Amino acid sequence: MKQAQVCIVGGGCVGLTLALGLAKADISVVVIDASKNQTLPGDDYALRVSALSLASQGLFESLNVWPEIIKQRATPYTSMDVRDQDSFGKIHFDHNDLDLPQLGYIVENDIIRYALISELEKQSNATLLFETRYQQIHQTDSDVFITLESGEPVIAKLLVAADGANSAIRKQFNMPITFKDYDHHAIVATVKTADEHNNTARQVFLPTGPLAFLPLPDKHTHSIVWSTSPEHCDTLLALDDSNFNKAVMAALDGQCGLCEVQSERMAFPLKMRY
């Protein structure tokens, strides 16, 4: 049997950040997650990245995970270029406008998760249970009982559901939800360009949806997120690499020159849940 003040189901970036904050505030915590423990990321860039604001950087600094993130891979973006393809609408600003060293950082989610786990493993009052699923959840007036698939019980005062957009805990406890399907899918991939990105985060608004180019550590490499209709998404995914490269370069209006996709392409439906 395991006991803690807080049990968190879900070991993604959000659940792990909360767990580390609690542990450092001298609150005992157990994290349950069905996925494997995060290993050190390899040489290839992961497809899922996050744009971390200076506020997020400050949070990670306070939790002592920022040094590990910087040690691995993190790309500062010092300027932003946002424009509308069908009009003269455009805005460009950089760190000098705000007297800042940078506007934020682009970091792979796997690296954020690795850094959080590395620091959590040093906390004596934090227990991480990876490749672990729960079977049942029961609550009384004073405690929550979580029964793992192994049969082992976990007892906590508070249960936190950090188990994602399709939260099984939310469904079990009939928590109300407002839902909206944006009728868009986001294609993510890693793209190399002929021109350097110059630490600029770019976004162009197309008739079908926005395309973002986010700088990665290699000065010619970007993580792209292309939001478009499901039908157009299927068309883009079906293209061979050569034609996809042309489509991406045309959509960005050639800002970074010739494009060359470096990874597989994946798509995710975009939905709002509140």
Image: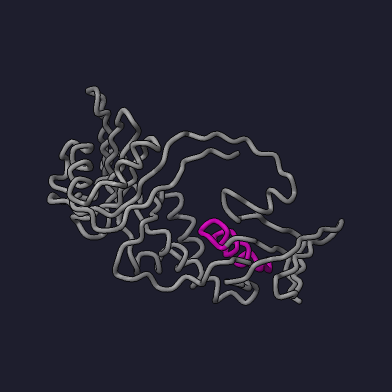
Identity of the residue drawn at 31% across and 32% down: 205
- Number of callouts: 0
**Residue 270 versus residue 46 in the image, above or below:** above
In the image: residue 58, left or right of residue 264? right
Q: Is residue 14 magenta?
A: yes
Residue reaching furthest to the top: 87
**Residue 72 versus residue 269 in the image, above or below:** below
Q: Position of residue 73 (x, y in %)?
A: 33, 64
Identity of the residue drawn at 71% across and 58% down: 159
Identity of the residue drawn at 59% across and 66% down: 33
Residue 26 visible from this viewpoint: no
Which coloring applies here? one colour
Q: Position of residue 38 (x, y in %)?
A: 47, 70
Quarter of the C terminus within the rendering: top right
**Residue 51 versus residue 69 in the image, above or below:** above
Q: Quadrant of residue 146?
A: bottom right
In the image: residue 162, left or right of residue 83? right
Residue 142 visible from this viewpoint: yes
Q: Position of residue 232 (x, y in %)?
A: 33, 37
Q: Is residue 189 magenta?
A: no
Between 40 and 90, the one nearer to me in the picture: 40
Quarter of the N terminus within the rendering: bottom right
Q: Position of residue 87 (x, y in %)?
A: 24, 22
Extent of the magenta region: 11-31
